[in-house]
Amino acid sequence: MKLIRPFLLSATLVSAILAPLAAPAQTSAASTAEARVIVRFKPQADSVRAKALSVRATRGEAREVAQTRATALGLRTGRALAAGISLDERTHVVTAKGVTSEQLMRQLAADSEVELAVVDGRRRHTKIPNDPLFGGADINPESTVGSAQARTIDQWYLKKPNSTVVSSINAPAAWDITTGSSGVIVAVLDTGVRLDHPDLAGQFVSGYDMIGYGSSSSATSVAIANDGNGPDADPSDPGDWVSQADINAGTLSGCTSSDIGNSSWHGTRVSGLIAAASNNGTTMAGVGWGLKIMPIRVLGKCGGYDSDIIAGMKWAAGISVPGLPANANKAKVLNMSLGGDGSCGTTGTGALYRDAITQVNAAGATVVVAAGNSEGLAVGLPGNCPGVVTVAALRHVGTKVGFSSLGPEVTIAAPGGNCINTGSGQPCLYPMISTTNAGTTTPVANDGSTTGSNASVGTSFSAPIVSGIIGLMATVRPNLTSAEAIQILTNTARAFPTTGGGSAADGNPLQCKAPSATVQDECYCTIRTCGAGMVDAAAAVGAALNLNGGAVLLSESPGTGVVAGQTLTLTLSSVGFASNQVIASANWSIVNSGGVVSSFASSNVSSATIIPSAAGTFSVRVDATDNMGKVYAQTATINVTPAPVATTPVSGSSGGGGGGGSVSALWLAGLLLAALALRRSAARG
């Protein structure tokens, strides 16, 4: 499934250079289509040595250097090339008209200064199946004791496993250890999020909209973004619906009629599974409701470009990217419920993903990728790259869901949702419940919708389950590495079942085979096809805690969001300490003031109080020392909302009908004078 589907001279001089190279005007589709190629120059190339590019360059500086190199490359190859912004010091997106991306790639790859040239492909989120019975129809195993419709739709996948629901992750036992720290950030690289969803309020740190980052000014990128502009600091999801009119207009390069559909709110669904606000008596629970989400928007209409995704990966992990602002909030986990065709080799697009993943891992972050929904075919790119946690999807009984991809690249398996009832119009009985929006195209403002009995299923929702678990692991082991996360997940996984799947109609499933050209629906997983086993949240978090030899945790009061001017209390506690082990001292410090805090109002060993002066985000760190001299560190990242504006209700209005119009000072003065006149008149009477 191919879903994922430069150094400016003066404007006058550039125009003069490029004019003789411009292709003659044509009316064909090929002349208006934009070819996009990612080019990496050789370290010793003349154009690289002539002018270096710093990873800390501003966007303007990066464009100037990239365009200089693109112009020189265009002169050598006979193409008018425009440069997008850069992925690193030697890697840039270049575009051209009147040629296909494949043709341009071949031309540029032949240049003596070019080390690598690949098509800037498109990736899409791992698409939500629109058929409630996708992957095969099964008989409800509870049908012998009641109607299929009698089952309560709940968050079955978070609970303790039992004989009927085998693949659930046992989150409550993990929550006995920790519900997550606000200092642990999970980046969601997706369609953006609905920042106004009530169940996600207070769960976000600042993110970024990457769509169009890799482009020169492009109508295609703006059309994909669907928010009217290019890259910026607003990662909110405007909707990713595709209509027949979009296809007919031809502005969405790479879109086909198969992309037509309503907005998915995919990033919002993924975010809710990771960290929806919980323990608040409403709606749903996230895997780690104490964690924070960093929304990175890389997918729009019909998916997103590899260049935008790779830039988003680096930025999320705190790696400098030319032309992008520094990221003040470094993510510990990257969730990527997206993918497409391709292999993760040492050449081509796979090499770019390999390089990015290596850098992200070195920065201390773990990358989690959905295996894909190819119905038993092989895992695609970037899920087949080394150094990532690739997640396959399980049915409630522990067999592979029909839609899930599989193969030796899979690290672990987690619930992905499935529908077991067969009646027409019946709801999906084992969906993945999460936050969403009721809008079919554009969003409904401040909407608190959650997915219910509709078919919210897919490996897109298996991956965030695992991302949330890794976030909990990082809470009790702040220095958790990607290699450690993978080792812990695989060592604590529960064995796959070998019985209990299928139905009377379908018969007993077969054992999953190595991926080939033939689809495989429900099958019994093996460690060579679905990873090490079924993920176990409690065992994984416990193992991370034991590896660290105890941990300290920070709790916040109030825990439902801090308002400017309101007192925030942070309380320090220990977990996993031995009976003779206690916290002896603590050093509190402000890591990032965000311009909203300057100092602690008070602090001691067990707690600290802070009064933020304005809306924004700040981070506090505590370094606690136990009575044996061992030091434990923990960080909390706090979002502060504006203080409510006090308003005095006033009767009357400026118009008819009893509405609440504004009232002028002159009108109020007149009302006061009239009242005084009435008082004097009453006194004379």
Image (cartoon, helix red, strand yellow):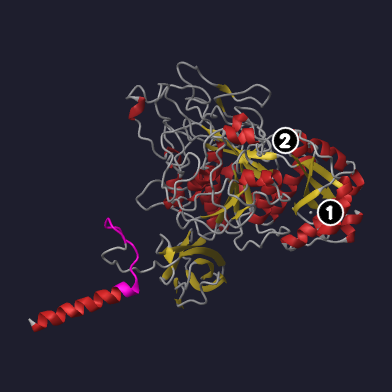
Q: Is 30 located above or below residue 608 in the figure?
A: above
Residue 91: where, in percent of width, then height? 79, 51
Quadrant where the image shows the C terminus: bottom left
Q: Nearer the viewer, residue 381 or 129?
A: 129
For the question of whether residue 411 can be seen, the reply is: no
Q: Which circle marks residue 399 in the picture?
A: none
664 within the magenta span: yes
Report which residue position mark 1 lands on: 15
The residue where tag 2 is placed is 342
Where residue 633 sits in the image (x, y, percent)?
Answer: 56, 65
Left or right: residue 108 compared with residue 173? right
Gap in Å between the C-alphas at discs 2 and 1? Answer: 37 Å
**Whole-percent x and y of residue 558?**
39, 64
Q: Secondary structure at mark 2?
A: loop
Task: Tell me the crowding category of disc 1: few under 14, some 14 to 19, or many 20 or more residues within 10 angstroms, Cα based.
Answer: few
Query: How far across and down, in percent of the image, does residue 522 sit?
Result: 54, 25
Q: Amino acid at mark 2?
A: Gly
Instruction: Name the residue located 46 percent from the left edge and 33 percent from the top edge.
Output: 166
Q: Nearer the viewer, residue 355 or 71?
A: 71
Magenta residues span 655-667
* Left or right of 71 in this view: 430: left
Quadrant where the N terminus is found in the figure: top right
Q: Main secondary structure of the magenta part?
A: loop
Secondary structure of the residue carrying numbered label 1: helix
Q: Residue at x 92, y 47 (%)?
A: 76
> Relative to 253, is 17 above or below?
below
Q: Looking at the picture, which amino acid does disc 1 mark?
A: Ser
Q: Is residue 38 visible?
A: yes
